[in-house]
Amino acid sequence: MGKLRKGTAATRDFYDRVGWRRQDGTLVDTRLFGWTDGPIRHAIEGQRKERVRQVAGGPGLRLAELGCGGTPAVFLAERCATYTAADFSSVGLSEAAAALEAANVPFETIETDITDLPFADGVFDVVYSAHAIYHIDTVDGQTAAFQEALRVVRPAAGRYSSWRTLSRSCSPIWPFVACLP
């Protein structure tokens, strides 16, 4: 992939060199940023996934995950006719391909900057992104990523997005789902 349009080269470099590499079988990203393991975390995560599944709908969806990195949302795979994993890290996309193959869903991986997507308008039923937008360090770049997500999702009577404030130092954008009602 060539020059990033609005994404950050430093973030891509970190994930290519460190974040999507494995140490003792675990992705470094998971070691650094993953939640602690425990029953409350599992309950909250299960509830979040079920809510996203309900909003996404399915089966038979054409889904794109923007900024999937090495940990795509395989919990949505059973609802998909096709799954498009988009990220600017080739290393992350290799990890994503292995996870999606294990989920037994038809998929493709696309190395791209999520602020400048190579897809036609309205080609997806659902666009999903989590833990990615806040890696874009400008409001202009985050806006471009949102505009691109909305451009490539099929026009519909309604769209859904979920925003959550992580901290004052991070963007209030996490996770994002654009889809049909």
Image (cartoon, rainbow, N blue to C red):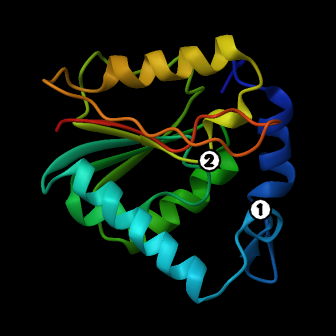
Query: Up-down: is 172 above or below 33?
Result: above
In the picture, measured across the screen, residue 93 lies left or right of residue 7, that is left
Which residue is found at the position 78% from the left and 47% from the top? 16
The kind of secondary structure element at disc 1 is: helix
Q: Which mark is residue 82?
A: none
Q: Return the residue at label 2.
A: 131
The kind of secondary structure element at disc 2 is: loop
Which residue is found at the position 19% from the left and 47% from the top? 61
Of pointers 2 and 1, the one earlier in the residue sequence: 1
Image-quadrant location for residue 78: bottom left
Q: Return the residue at label 1.
A: 33
Q: Nearer the viewer, residue 125 or 171?
A: 171
Query: Up-down: is 49 above or below 178?
Result: below
Which residue is found at the position 65% from the left and 45% from the top? 90
Which residue is found at the position 83% from the left and 36% from the top? 169
Query: Up-down: is 119 above or below 168?
Result: above
Q: Nearer the viewer, residue 64 or 157?
A: 157
Image coordinates for residue 58, horizontal then vertical, percent: 15, 54
Neighbours of disc 2 within 10 Å: few (<14), some (14-19), many (20+): some
Q: Nearer the viewer, residue 51 or 12?
A: 51
User: Marks 2 and 1: CB-CB under 8 Å?
Assistant: yes
Q: Is residue 5 visible?
A: no
Neighbours of disc 1 within 10 Å: few (<14), some (14-19), many (20+): few
> Quadrant of the image for the C terminus?
top left
Residue extending farthest bottom: 39
Give the CA separation, mark 2 to mark 1.
Answer: 10 Å
Residue kind at label 2, given as amino acid type: His
In the picture, measured across the screen, residue 76 lies left or right of residue 85, that is left
Image coordinates for residue 7, horizontal then vertical, percent: 70, 23
